[in-house]
Image (cartoon, rainbow, N blue to C red):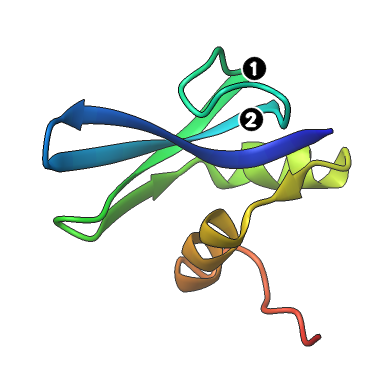
Amino acid sequence: MVKLRLKRYGRKKQPSYRIVVMDSRNKRDGKAIEELGFYNPINNETRVDISKVLQRLAQGAQTTRTVQNILNKAQIIAKENN
């Protein structure tokens, strides 16, 4: 299953994350299929390629909870009522 998830990079105690498309069986920092943006929790800075995200979601990619929350805050996708 292909998922939109976070890939960690940055220095110790100063994490930054890339929003990537990767197989759910890969390691967190494993090889990504495609990079869609990044998220910096320290500065609360987010950059996302909206067209690529929407394209991957249309192709059936799933999001992790954290990426779902980031995309909701950026108002890229609507919140789903469970």
Mark 2 secondary-structure assignment: strand
Residue 81 appears left or right of 50: right
Q: How much space separates mark 2 and mark 1, taking CA atoms?
A: 5 Å
Q: Label 2: few (<14), some or many (≥20) within 10 Å?
A: many
Q: Is residue 16 above or below residue 27?
A: below
Mark 1 secondary-structure assignment: loop
Q: Position of residue 38 (x, y in %)?
A: 37, 40
Residue 3 appears left or right of 8: right
Residue at point 46%, 22% (across, down): 29
Q: Position of residue 28 (x, y in %)?
A: 51, 29
Q: How many marks can you see?
A: 2
Q: Is residue 23 above or below residue 5?
A: above
Q: Which mark is residue 68?
A: none
In contact (CB < 8 Å): disc 2 and disc 1: yes
Task: Compare marks 2 and 1 and give the one earlier in the sequence.
Answer: 2
Q: Which mark is residue 21?
A: 2
Quarter occupied by residue 42: bottom left
Residue 46 appears left or right of 66: left
Residue at point 76%, 39% (across, down): 55
- Foreground: 52 or 11? 11
Which quarter shows the N terminus? top right
* Three-letter amino acid code at the position of disc 1: Ile
Q: Furthest residue to the top?
A: 31
Residue 18 appears left or right of 66: left
Residue at point 64%, 30% (across, down): 21
Residue at point 33%, 52% (across, down): 46
Judging by the rendered image, the residue that carries numbered circle 1 is 33
* Three-letter amino acid code at the position of disc 2: Val
Quarter occupied by residue 7: top left
Q: Is residue 50 above or below residue 69?
A: above
Q: Position of residue 81 (x, y in %)?
A: 77, 87
Quarter occupied by residue 33: top right
